[in-house]
Image: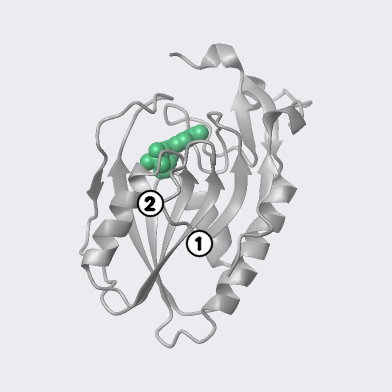
């Protein structure tokens, strides 16, 4: 298990959108992680995870944090050739771009089926770490056999070092990003890339 190949992406390396014929793409300032980079990295993460859990008899339970992780989850699990269960949890945190927030709360429609199992927590992005700290504590209370975490993105400038993440897609600058599941005011989740919006679109 390693995240040694985690790449740091800075916004200045981003590329401008050239095709602005579709409404949503017009709001983008720069693409910072392309569709191809996402695809290649998710494939690499899936290989690493599949190899680490190759001997897991019962298979995995993926505890997935909604809604930002759905696209990452869908792409990742189709490349994981093991038995798995998927539990979906919701963490209510903050609206818009503000990260000055109330304490997050966790909800799940069903009791988690994690007791005695190998659990992999899946989240879109590690920002302040509040979400993952909460989900991890919740999972641990249910006495799983093991717990690891995978995130597509991490903002190392913000993420506290005590929040353990085992697999990381990309490290990014401390910027608010959208696309590939991540939203701004519930929009832009369906963008096939990760991008920064035009500054005038962010209300502060
Ligand atoms: P944390 O609890 O501060 O680590 O925040 C985690 C959650 O905040 C993520 O799962 C996202 O849903 C949301 N979030 C944090 N940063 C961003 C961002 O740059 N774009 C979109 N959502 C974000
Ligand atoms: Mg989230």
Camera-side mark, 1 or 2? 1
**Where in the figure is residue 102, as x and y percent of width and height?**
25, 31
Q: Which residue occupies the extreme top position in the image?
A: 200
Q: Secondary structure at mark 1?
A: loop
Q: Are marks 1 and 2 in contact (CB under 8 Å)?
A: no
Q: Quadrant of ligand 1?
A: top left
Question: Residue, x 38% and y 51% (percent of image)?
Answer: 65
Q: Residues within 10 Å of mark 2 (few under 14, many from 20)?
A: many
Q: Quadrant of residue 84?
A: bottom left
**Where in the figure is residue 93, as x and y percent of width and height?**
31, 36
Residue 19 lies, with reference to residue 123, above or below; the image says above
Question: Residue, x 68% and y 30% (percent of image)?
Answer: 11
**Where in the figure is residue 38, as x and y percent of width and height?**
67, 50
Q: Which residue is mark 2?
A: 65
Looking at the image, can residue 193 be seen? yes
User: Is the CB of mark 2 within 8 Å of ligand 2?
Assistant: yes
Q: Quadrant of residue 139?
A: bottom left
Q: Which residue is mark 1?
A: 166
> Does residue 169 appear left or right of residue 63 in this picture?
right
Quarter placement of the N terminus:
bottom right
């Amino acid at each position: 298990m390693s995240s040694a190949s985690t790449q740091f992406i800075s916004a200045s390396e981003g590329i401008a959108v050239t095709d602005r014929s579709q409404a949503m793409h017009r709001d983008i300032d720069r693409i910072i992680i392309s569709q191809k980079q996402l695809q290649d990295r998710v494939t690499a993460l899936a290989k690493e995870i599949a190899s680490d859990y190759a001997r897991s008899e019962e298979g995995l339970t993926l505890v997935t944090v909604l809604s930002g992780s759905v696209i990452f989850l869908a792409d990742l699990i189709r490349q994981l050739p093991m038995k798995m269960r998927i539990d979906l949890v919701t963490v209510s945190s903050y609206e818009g771009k503000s990260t000055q927030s109330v304490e997050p709360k966790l909800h799940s429609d069903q009791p988690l089926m994690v007791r005695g199992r190998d659990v992999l927590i899946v989240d879109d992005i590690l920002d302040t770490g509040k979400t993952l700290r909460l989900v991890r504590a919740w999972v641990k209370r249910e006495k799983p056999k093991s717990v690891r975490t995978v995130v597509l993105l991490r903002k190392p400038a913000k993420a506290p070092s005590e929040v353990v993440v085992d697999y990381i897609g990309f490290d990014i600058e401390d910027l608010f990003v959208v696309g590939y599941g991540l939203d701004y005011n519930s929009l832009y989740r369906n963008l096939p890339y990760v991008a920064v919006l035009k500054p005038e679109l962010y209300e502060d």
